[in-house]
Image (cartoon, rainbow, N blue to C red):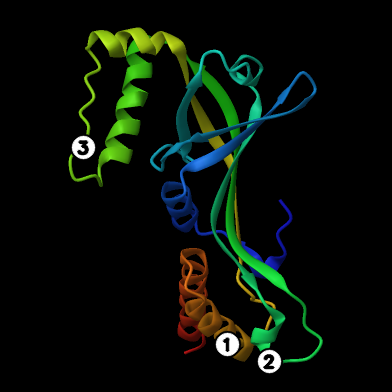
């Protein structure tokens, strides 16, 4: 993706955090000579060298996996985002913009068909997404229903070859303006705006630390 230098984030742990916190991604591949996309949750494994890997599954009826197998694919993850009004800068010759965080992961798609491996992937999904619930659902991979539905899905792994992060947080504006935007975003009340304000505050604090 297009990333001006001021907006580029290269810290792998930050990028993995965004994927983990915003795991419902967009998987894009080439299918019959045209882009094909599937919206689906993806798990990230940070331990796979050198850039980690993504793990997921999709319906076997979805034609994407057939041509994607062995292909370089793109997974897109959108983090928090918020509109920024030019009135907040209290300055002339400014325009509206949108602040946001996004991560792109490219890598080779490998389909997984073995039943045991498929059920292991489903178990990882359940473990991750049920972990914060007060009464987590228990998945039984040996149960009759699990054995049956495993035939209706295809698992996959994407070994990441390129990981890109874009943190567009008004870095091209003076600190004073950015602080005004932070205050306005906090006051707006919605979750996305508050999340962007917190990220801007973190970045301002990091810049202060580097200058000391």
For label 2, count other residues whose C-alpha is less than 10 Å away and answer few (under 14), some (14-19) or many (20+): few
- Foreground residue, 19 or 191? 191
Q: Is residue 196 left or right of residue 136?
A: right
Asked if labels 1 and 2 touch by Cβ distance under 8 angstroms, the answer is yes
How far from the left and from the top, in percent, is residue 4?
72, 64
Q: Secondary structure at mark 1?
A: helix
201 lies above or below 36: below
Res 170 → quadrant: bottom right
Residue shown at 48%/35% (left/top)? 54
Could you say where residue 43 lies in the image, as x and y percent from the top left?
42, 37
Label whose residue precedes the other's in the sequence (2 or 1): 2
User: What secondary structure is found at the residue carrying circle 3?
Assistant: loop
Residue at 24%, 44% (x, y): give it. 133
Above or below residue 198? Residue 119 is: above
Residue 118 lies, in percent from the top left, at 38, 17
- Relative to 126, is 73 on the left or the right? right
Q: Tell me the number on the disc at residue 127.
A: none
Q: Is residue 207 visible?
A: no
Q: Residues within 10 Å of mark 1 (few under 14, many from 20)?
A: some
Q: Which mark is residue 90?
A: 2
Q: Which residue is mark 3?
A: 136
Residue assigned mark 1: 180
Mark 3 / mark 1, whichever is N-terminal: 3
- Nearest to the observer: residue 40 or residue 112: 40
How many angstroms separate mark 3 from mark 2 (CA)?
A: 49 Å
Q: Nearer the viewer, residue 107 or 180?
A: 180
In 3D space, how far apart are the residues under numbered discs 2 and 1 (Cα atoms)?
8 Å
The part of the image, by quadrant, that contains residue 152 is top left
């Amino acid at each position: 993706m297009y990333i001006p230098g001021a907006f580029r984030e290269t810290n792998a742990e930050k990028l993995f955090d965004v994927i983990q916190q915003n795991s419902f991604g967009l998987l894009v591949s080439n299918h019959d000579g045209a882009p094909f996309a599937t919206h689906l949750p993806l798990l990230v494994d940070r331990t796979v060298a050198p850039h980690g890997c993504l793990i997921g599954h999709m319906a076997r009826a979805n034609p994407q996996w057939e041509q994607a197998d062995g292909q370089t694919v793109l997974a897109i993850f959108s983090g928090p985002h918020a509109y920024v009004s030019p009135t907040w800068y209290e300055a002339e010759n400014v325009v509206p913009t949108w602040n946001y965080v996004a991560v792109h992961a490219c890598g080779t798609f490998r389909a997984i068909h073995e039943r045991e491996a498929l059920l292991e992937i489903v178990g990882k999904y359940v473990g991750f997404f049920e972990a914060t619930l007060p009464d987590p659902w228990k998945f039984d991979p040996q149960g009759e229903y699990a054995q049956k539905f495993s035939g209706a899905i295809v698992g996959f792994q994407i070994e990441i070859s390129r990981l890109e992060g874009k943190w567009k947080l008004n870095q091209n504006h003076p600190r004073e303006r950015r602080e005004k935007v932070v205050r306005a975003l906090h006051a707006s009340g919605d979750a996305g705006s508050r999340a962007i304000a917190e990220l801007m505050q973190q970045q301002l604090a990091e810049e202060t630390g580097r200058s000391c």
